[in-house]
Amino acid sequence: QSFFIYMLLAFVVIGCKNKTSEIKNTSATSSENQQKPNIVFIYTDDLGYGDVSAYGAKEIKTPAIDALAEGGILFKNAYATAATCTPSRYSVLTGNYAWRKKGTSVAKGDQGLLIDTNRTTLPKVLKQAGYKTGIVGKWHLGLGGANGPDWNGKISPGPLEIGFDYSYLIPATGDRVPCVFVENHHIVNLDPNDPIQVNYKEKVGDWPTGKENPELLTMKPSQGHNHTIVNGISRIGYMTGGKAALWDDETIPMELVDKSNKFINKNKEQPFFLLLSTHDIHVPRVANKMFQGKSGMGPRGDVILQLDWTVNEIVKTLKAQNLLENTIVIFSSDNGPVVDDGYHDQARELLGDHKPTGGLRGGKYSAYDGGSKIPLIIRWPEVKNKGMVSDALVSQVDFLKSFATMVGIEKLDDDVIDSQNQLDVLKGESTKGRTALIQESFMGPLSYLEGDWKYIEPLDGPELVPWGPIIETGFEKVPQLYNIEDDPNEKNNLASKFPVKVKKMKEKLANLKKD
Ligand code: NG6
Ligand code: CA
């Protein structure tokens, strides 16, 4: 009998022990998770300030994006650092303005990695704080060494060398070859018996090009885009081989959502950072059957609906995994909108009353606000002012320092020059924001924005983007000064009226350039 009692006691003790350690483990994980929310950044391409219904679009509805704003903060004065993709993304990842580094304008599809592997990056900082980090979608920051990527071998350095644990990439853009996905260091589904060749100078192989065989095209180019034809669409650059690896344009968003879901599911037990960098709404705009003809605005409108679907899918996953209330969802765009960006996709003809820039002057590529003033919505799991609209001046370059602060990393290396901690502003707890920021236009002037005033440095160049999108560049031989509070569409150049202000702003810009 005493043996029986002894056994019983032993069971109870062992049982309790297991229980306590179990409780300990779970409580440790959950409290850790509570301290460190996941971050999902949905970074869209070429989506304009006026393309979202939460920002006032009437001709198109984006309910999933709007719902993010209801659960967080919508920023009315948010900026990408540049009016094109590569420099804006460079700034998000490094916390610096891209014009500080040469060669960071729109990258070619066989460009080597543009981010120095030694420098501080957003994913490195988050990784240091215990996050699993992943990027799914458009990269456009170069891959490989100085001579570009070894497409048939190990593609490195790239995102994995600058702090991401996982990557599934559109290497450059949807309109640039090679039209394949790269997972970590390798092209997905590449048959070694059918090696891939990519060339940005001359034709390789015998695949037809848009220039030679326009009759084969399902979407005709309006500007450039007349090199190798892939899936009936001619692209920028030449390629041949790697047939089994080619993506299907109509299912790119589904593929990216699937890979994002897998990343989320795999890492749900620990804090994670997912950068979901969509192809939408960049050209070529090829909507999936689910969205074709649904907007009444042609492919450009249809892919906005498709983008909203992407947002909804990701939110659904977070909800299903019980993660939404511990995840920050950031939604933004890399630069302003463009209607015709190089393909005849009826974007101009079917635009109707829709205003992609929301009325701002310029657009993608431009020095005017249409170039880099973008939608920014941050849904916070817990935040006091849910549904708030913030007027604070914010820049995507501040994400690095702000989120570093959030995860408890206060001290960063001094290679981070431009990023500021604006966490309280991003959370809607302060409306102070930045006092000033710089905007980079495409191959053109820089602008300096301070308070209500914007100064655009004088530069000689064409008035309109030369290859055809019908967008004002912002080039002027004389300085430009606008009061963007009174004149948000930058119509009245006040430079000759306020020469002292011009001089001061010019000096401040020059000083910042020296940093
Ligand atoms: C331009 C392309 C445009 C787009 C852009 C980069 C032509 C005529 N135009 O050169 O279609 O690809 O580069 O866009 O080739 S971005 O959003 O990635 O910066
Ligand atoms: Ca872009």
Image (spheres, helix red, strand yellow):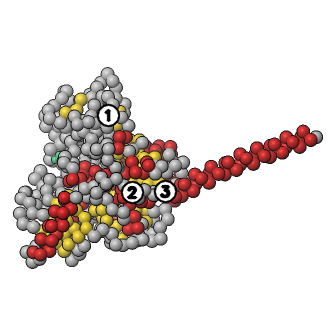
Examine the image and state in which quarter residue 114 appears.
top left
Q: How far apart are marks 2 and 1 (CA)?
A: 32 Å
Residue where numbered disc 2 is placed: 411
Few, some or many C-alpha atoms within 10 Å of disc 2 (few <14, some 14-19, many ≥20)?
few
Quarter of the C terminus within the rendering: bottom left
Residue type at the position of mark 3: Pro
Residue type at the position of mark 2: Lys
Q: Residue at x 38, y 68 (%)?
A: 425
Q: Which residue is drawn at 32% across and 44% down?
A: 118
Q: Earlier in the sequence, mark 2 or mark 3?
A: 3
* Numbered tag placed on residue 107 in the rendering: none
Q: Considering depth in this image, is 185 or 98 the residue closer to the camera?
A: 98
Residue 19: x %, y % from top left: 71, 48
Q: Earlier in the sequence, mark 2 or mark 1?
A: 1
Q: Distance between the residues labelled 3 and 1?
A: 31 Å
Few, some or many C-alpha atoms within 10 Å of disc 3 (few <14, some 14-19, many ≥20)?
many
Residue 100: x %, y % from top left: 21, 53
Query: Relative to 430, is 197 on the left or the right?
Result: left
- Residue 416 can be seen in this image: yes
Numbered-mark total: 3
* Numbered tag placed on residue 37 in the rendering: 3
Q: How far apart are marks 2 and 3 (CA)?
A: 20 Å
* Numbered tag placed on residue 155 in the rendering: 1
- Disc 3 element: loop
Whether 238 is drawn above or below 387: the answer is above
